[in-house]
């Protein structure tokens, strides 16, 4: 039994979230969570660093001076069958253009906006608890 992104988002911690795109992808299974606050390169796919079921957290500041990298970043997450992206920011949303959000909708790739006063560690802790409970139930 795999935990789905929509199950995790029912946690009270996420009561202020907003789904920016990919609503139909909330049923994707989540296998692990990580921070992805760096620019993306094509090597990530070839090296197998990203995989299906990954959910990532970012504040998008890696695109402050390199906005042209966001299409590769999103395309890579979609191609590796990542389960979603938690965006923790109020300031950098402008890099998520209507074209990027449409691409995510077309590929059922959820982008979830989380208020920027939520620490990454708290988000990771909540998701990790769901994953641990899911693993215990599976065993």
Image (cartoon, grey):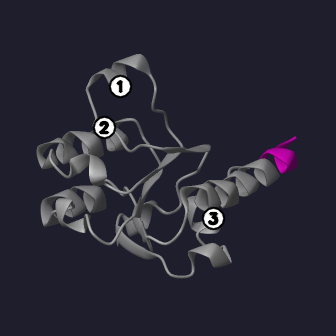
Circle 1 is placed at which residue position?
45
Query: Pointer 2 and pointer 1: residues touching (CB < 8 Å)?
Result: yes
The reply, left or right, for residue 52 in relation to residue 64 is right
Question: Could you tell me how far apart the alpha carbons at marks 2 and 1 are, in whole angstroms?
Answer: 7 Å
| Marks 2 and 3 in Cβ contact (< 8 Å) | no
Where residue 35 appears, x then y in whole percent?
Answer: 48, 45
Q: Which residues are magenta?
A: 135-139
Does the segment drawn in magenta span residue 138? yes
- The residue indicated by pointer 2 is 76
Is 42 located above or below residue 72 in the figure?
A: above
Q: Which x, y percent locates residue 137?
A: 85, 50
Badge 1 or badge 3: first in the primary sequence: 3
Q: Does the image show residue 3?
A: no
User: Residue 82's x, y, as percent?
Assistant: 44, 44
> From mark 2 to mark 3, how far is it between C-alphas?
23 Å
Vertical order, 61 against 93 (above or below): above
| In this view, 62 is above or below 111 | above
Callout 1 touching callout 3 (CB < 8 Å) = no
Per the image, the residue denoted by label 3 is 8
């Amino acid at each position: 039994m795999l935990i789905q992104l929509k199950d995790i988002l029912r946690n009270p911690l996420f009561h202020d979230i907003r789904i920016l795109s990919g609503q139909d992808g909330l049923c994707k299974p989540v296998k692990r969570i990580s921070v992805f606050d760096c620019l993306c390169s094509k090597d990530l796919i070839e090296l197998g660093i990203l995989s299906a079921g990954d959910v990532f957290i970012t504040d998008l500041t890696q695109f402050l001076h390199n906005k042209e990298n966001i299409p590769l970043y999103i395309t890579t997450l979609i191609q590796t069958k990542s389960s979603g992206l938690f965006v923790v920011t109020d300031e950098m949303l402008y890099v998520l253009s209507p074209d990027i959000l449409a691409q995510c909708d077309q590929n059922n790739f959820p982008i979830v906006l989380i208020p920027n006063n939520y620490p990454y560690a708290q988000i990771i802790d909540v998701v990790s608890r769901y994953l641990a409970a899911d693993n215990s139930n599976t065993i």
